[in-house]
Amino acid sequence: MSAAVNGLPWTVLRLHRAALLGWGAFVAAVTGLLLWAVEVKEDAARAELAYCSHHGTCTITATLDYDDTIGLAALFLCYSFLAVAAWAGAALVARELETGTAQLVWTQSVTPVRWLVAKLALPALLITVGGAVLVPVFRHAWWINPDRTDSSWASANVFVARGPTMVAYGLCALAVGALAGLVLRRSLPALGVSFAVMLVLHQLVQSCRTDLWPSVTRTGTALFTPPDTAWQLANGVIVHGQRVANPEYGHCNGTGTKATQCLADHGITGYYSVYHPASHFWPLQLVETGIVLTVTAAATAATFRLLRRRTA
């Protein structure tokens, strides 16, 4: 094997060192933010809640501050794939095709397939390693949050940041960016297309997230309240055998003859509640990860197939 092939990974590393260093800085910054929250803010938040439990009047400033920090970190992790998509679309493939650098490399004992493998392998490794650091740190910081109000596991950003879905979106953005770059062969159009495709994919999967695993439905003659940790999807009353969500029958609440007569007047025979318990986190997480990785594999296969056709 020639020296050009052996040195190809180092060439990719030097060529994209600014972006790769930027990713390393992002991983370090978010990790530092979460560790700072755990080591500095968590004790103050927990002490504040302990004080409030024994006093009628108090503030929860430290608790909200901790929750805001977790929410900010979740936002960064959830949407980090957009930065990957923009970079992969603009710089990874399209720029070298646009300037002719790729064609020059292909004349130096480096086949187009080997060139593309090197282009994708190193960033994919760094995305995976970065996710392997960020996700456990975030899970720890989220888990010890004294008051998970705005950052429950069902929150869209927290859901992605707490599992392998975060890494899957990053790898998918890399593959989609490479495909867009190879198809368009121009940096700015490839950047816009890869960014838009990943944003649409994320929003589409997120809108279907609740359906990725069967939810739990509870019905009965008594009002049922799911656990605090559950992801509430729907609730309401059963009227003549039909479910009616969020009815305006609050005056029927309570017990006794008056409440029973009120329910009968409106035809209410029971209540229902649809939710995902906390135990559904991993099934939902793994199904979504599988979907995103399937798109990743399809985009990668399409990229290699198109490269072979154009360089045959």
Image (tube, rainbow, N blue to C red):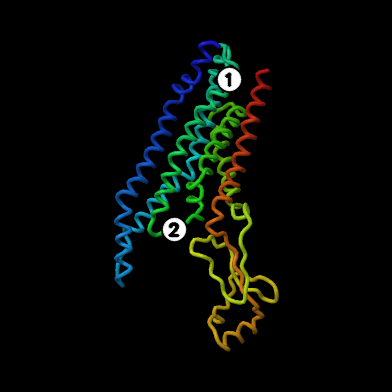
| Residue 42: % across, % down | 33, 54
> Which residue is drawn at the image coordinates 63% and 76% (left, top)?
270
Horizontal placement of 67 versus 289: left or right? left
| Residue picked out by circle 2 | 150
Vertical order, 132 against 112 (above or below): below
> Which residue is drawn at the image coordinates 49% and 21% (left, top)?
9
Sooner in the amino-acid sequence: mark 1 or mark 2? 1
Vertical order, 97 against 226 (above or below): above
| Residue 75: % across, % down | 45, 47
| Residue 15: % across, % down | 46, 22
Indicate the quadrant where residue 279 lies.
Answer: bottom right
| Residue 193: % across, % down | 58, 36
- Nearest the viewer among 280 and 63 is 280
Q: Quadrant of the C terminus?
A: top right
- Distance between the Cα atoms at labels 1 and 2? 47 Å
| SS assignment at label 2 | loop
Indicate the quadrant where residue 268 lies.
Answer: bottom right
Tell me, for residue 101, which label it has, or none.
Answer: none
> Which residue is drawn at the image coordinates 35% and 45% (left, top)?
35
Q: Residues within 10 Å of mark 2 (few under 14, many from 20)?
A: some
- Residue type beneath disc 2: Asp
| Residue picked out by circle 1 | 114
Q: Residues within 10 Å of mark 1 (few under 14, many from 20)?
A: few
- Residue type beneath disc 1: Arg
Residue 301 seen by the camera: yes
- Nearest the viewer among 9 and 181 is 9
